[in-house]
Amino acid sequence: MDYLFPPEPTVSVGIVGRSERFPVRRIYCVGHNYVSHILETGRDPDRESPFFFNKPSDGIVGDRESLPYPPATASLHHEVELVVAIMQGGYEIPPEQAEDHIFGYAVGVDLTRRDLQQVAEDRSLPWTAAKAFDRSAPCGLLTPKGGCPQMNAGQIALTVNDRPRQDADLGEMIWSVPEIVSYLSRMFELKPGDLVFTGTPSGVGFVLPGDRIEATIEGLTPLRFSIEDAD
Ligand code: MN
């Protein structure tokens, strides 16, 4: 096929112990999936249920990369999240079959322009500028599901310059991984290459130029990245 100009290369994520890479199609994200984070945003967990939004697939930042501090914000926040990688697509997947559609898991960070998110909320606008900006989706190496524990419990944590910021347990998720895959597949046809960021616990906070971020989930390879120095 002739294109008017060369298409952008396919975005991909590395896989632990494999030379092949996981090609990324779409990035879905879950909002408000931990009670502790709903509480720290000043909302009522009894009245908030999880929901979905998207990030662009070319927003992926790989392990040990650095990114420039993004424009148009004075409040760039970290949100450590379990990332689910879909290998087998489908519609209306029952929770008990969700596992069959999953390739594996990674540690991700949902970078957020918190100040723009507040503006969006105040004015009932979409979250696009707050959540779906360039380089907003750092994602570590994927561990195939056979090589890690079941992702229904285990520590999820994040440090900035070695100082603890977030520290929680995957068992606190409101929607479990199978429930997320099932809900998503009722609204969208899932396809191989889809990634799902599954929400963040409390402790979100800002990062600054020069900061080193390390995000960890028990049983998975840590994700490390940094924000470039301003100059
Ligand atoms: Mn998030």
Image (tube, rainbow, N blue to C red):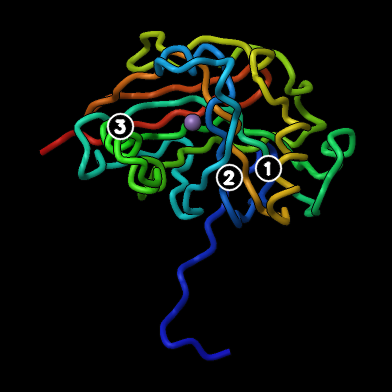
**Left or right: 13, with 99 as reference point:** left
At 44% across and 22% down in the image, what residue appears? 214
Type of the residue with mark 2? Tyr
Q: Which residue is mark 2?
A: 28
**Left or right: 219, with 93 as reference point:** left
Front position in the image: 96 or 218: 96
Q: Residue furthest left?
A: 231
At 35% across and 17% down in the image, what residue appears? 160
Mark 2 vs mark 1: give the one in front: 2
Q: Quadrant of residue 153?
A: top right
How far is disc 2 from disc 1 in space, using C-alphas? 10 Å
**Element carrying mark 3:** helix
Q: Which residue is mark 1?
A: 85
**Left or right: 155, with 202 as reference point:** right
| x, y percent for residue 57 | 51, 53
Looking at the rendered image, the quarter that the N terminus falls into is bottom right
Q: State yes or no: Cβ of the residue under disc 1 lies below 8 Å from any atom of ligand 1.
A: no
Type of the residue with mark 3? Gln
At 68% across and 20% down in the image, what residue appears? 219
